[in-house]
Amino acid sequence: MAAPMMLYLSIGILSFISVITCFDEEFEGSRTLSLEHSFDQGPDPVFTRRGTIVVKSVQSKKATFSQGATLSSEDRLRLKETVSVDGIYRIRIPVRESGEGTVYISSFTKACAIYESSLSDVVIVSVDQSGEVLGVSMGTAKSCTGLEVPKSNLTDWKTTVELSVTVSGPMPDTQSYIEKIKREEQEKAKGAKTDDRSFLAKYWMYIVPFVLFMFVMQNVDPNQAGGGGR
């Protein structure tokens, strides 16, 4: 009885650890981001709250969008007016506070694309491995074709959130590179090492035969050299 009991206990503990691990992976790095939008076309657009982005897991790239409220009739009218002037639709996310105020990341697309997609868009949030928000972009499934969209399709946002996680590249092996450069310099120094020997020490094998030849030639009797002709 003891052995089966220990087996069941071990299985139970392993299962519990597995559940805890999955839970941690699922919700690691959770963060809530406020998504704001604007239909204004001027240099200083006024933004209002559109909803909330919840980053559930950076590792698993899981994030969701929660709509704050349905698009009001006033906002629907502003959207159509923006489409009529071929304007842009803007979004932004506040990421941190600085000495000069709130720091935002922002993006935009053509308002007609949002309109003809019936408020269906994809918001891509770029983060680093620690969950720090680096940027945002957006896109729609449809382009601008002049399609007329019923008002009933312009009430709720159909937003998909995607996480783009920036991965740090491999660090250069600086130490190995420096050692390699030093070895190459040492090899060059060895190859270019100067010969400090004297001229005679370096070329005696050529000088001695020449000296002997000149000595012999100087001691040759000219009369003997020509006596064979008599």
Image (cartoon, rainbow, N blue to C red):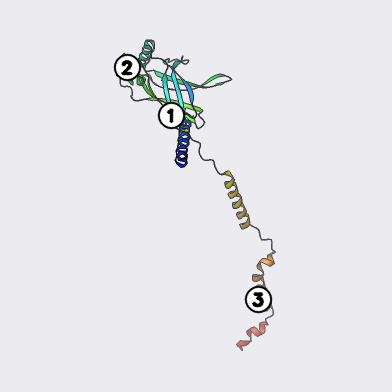
Q: Position of residue 169 (x, y in %)?
A: 50, 38
* Quadrant of the rendered image containing residue 211: bottom right
Q: CA distance from mark 2 to mark 3?
A: 114 Å
Q: What residue is disc 2 on?
A: 153
Nearest to the observer: residue 65 or residue 164:
65
Q: CA distance from mark 2 to mark 1?
A: 27 Å
Answer with mark 2 or mark 1, whichever residue precedes in sequence.
1
> Which numbered disc covers residue 214?
none
Quadrant for the C terminus, please.
Answer: bottom right
Position above or below: 1 against 132: below
Nearest to the observer: residue 48 or residue 157:
157
Quadrant for the N terminus, please.
Answer: top left
Q: Residue furthest bottom?
A: 230
* Quadrant of the rendered image containing residue 227: bottom right
Q: Position of residue 154 (x, y in %)?
A: 34, 16
Mark in front: 3 vs 1 = 1
- Asked if the residues shown at circle 3 and circle 1 are in contact, with their CB atoms under 8 angstroms apart, the answer is no
Position above or below: 96 against 11: above
Q: Amino acid at mark 2?
A: Asn
Q: Amino acid at mark 3?
A: Phe
Q: What residue is disc 1 on?
A: 62
62 lies left or right of 103 = left
Answer with mark 2 or mark 3, whichever residue precedes in sequence.
2
Nearest to the observer: residue 56 or residue 213:
56
Name the residue at 58% across, 44% down: 174
Position above or below: 119 against 74: below
Mark in front: 2 vs 1 = 1
Q: What residue is disc 3 on?
A: 213
Answer with mark 3 or mark 1, whichever residue precedes in sequence.
1
